Image: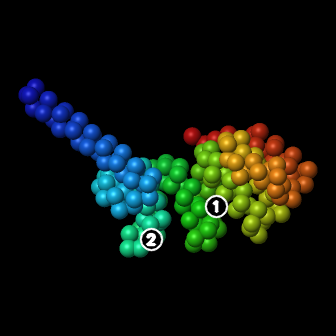
Amino acid sequence: MVAIRRLFAIAAFAACVAAHAGLKEGAIAYSRGDFATTLRELKPLAEQGQPLAQYLVGSSLVNAKPPLGNVGEGEDWLKKAAGQGQIAAMRDLGALNLFGKKDRAEARQWLLQAADRGDAEAQHLMALYLLDGPEAEASRGEAYMWLHLAAERGHVLSGVMLTTVRPPFSPEQRADGLRRAGEWKPVR
């Protein structure tokens, strides 16, 4: 009985080590832009429900050129990862919908989820979303808030927009944005 438990524990440990090795290799391949290796290493882990693997598979499929690239399948993987709380997947879904598919409602949904969790890039993109939409004039205070929060988190372009480019924010809009930023609490 003890021997069987030990064998089971060794097998489980070996599976974890192998999965971790695949995740590491896939992530390294992704960082190099080697999407073929990323997909080969990570698709089995993504199919098992590993959120980081799902995100990297989805991002690889969205960013790769054909024949590897498949935006629809990539979006499906990103949604699976986002559904498990993968913030980068939420942000990328927002960007995909904002710039690619041009679905402003879905872009707002995903960007807001990631921005509310403190993702600086999503906060920046949320500000761009607000400054470029039909509601731009009414939402300048909120846009200023997102730029301010992103800049506080080290997002350089948001800082530049606040200090150098200065979109036309009135003193009231800046004050409203700073008040909102002071009241903002990240979602956990």
Task: State the mark number for residue 108.
Answer: 1
SS category of the residue bearing label 2: loop
User: What residue appears at the point 21 percent right and 38 percent down from the top-left corner?
Assistant: 14
User: What residue appears at the point 58 percent right and 67 percent down from the top-left corner?
Assistant: 97
User: Residue 35, located in which quarter of the rendered image?
Assistant: bottom left
Q: Position of residue 40 (x, y in %)?
A: 31, 58
The residue that mark 2 highlights is: 65
User: What residue appears at the point 47 percent right and 66 percent down from the top-left corner?
Assistant: 62
Q: Position of residue 153 (x, y in %)?
A: 67, 41
Colour scheme used in the picture? Answer: rainbow
Viewer-nearest residue: 158 or 132: 158
User: Residue 95, located in which quarter of the rendered image?
Assistant: bottom right
C-alpha gap between disc 1 and disc 2: 26 Å
Amino acid type of the residue tagged 1 in the rendering? Arg
Give the class, few, some or many, for how many residues have Cα within 10 Å of label 1's Cα (few <14, many ≥20): many
In the image, is 120 to the left or to the right of 136?
left
Q: Give the number of callouts.
A: 2
Q: Quadrant of the N terminus?
A: top left
Relative vertical location of residue 143 with respect to residue 9 in this rendering, above or below: below
Comparing labels 1 and 2, the label whose residue is closer to the camera? 2
User: What residue appears at the point 90 percent right and 54 percent down from the top-left corner?
Assistant: 170
Amino acid type of the residue tagged 2 in the rendering? Lys
Q: Position of residue 178 (x, y in %)?
A: 81, 44
Q: Position of residue 168 (x, y in %)?
A: 87, 59
Q: Are marks 1 and 2 in contact (CB under 8 Å)?
A: no
SS category of the residue bearing label 1: helix
Q: Quadrant of the C terminus?
A: top right
Q: Residue furthest front?
A: 32
Q: Is tag 1's residue or tag 2's residue first in the polypeptide sequence?
A: 2
Residue 88 appears in the figure: yes
Viewer-nearest residue: 152 or 4: 152
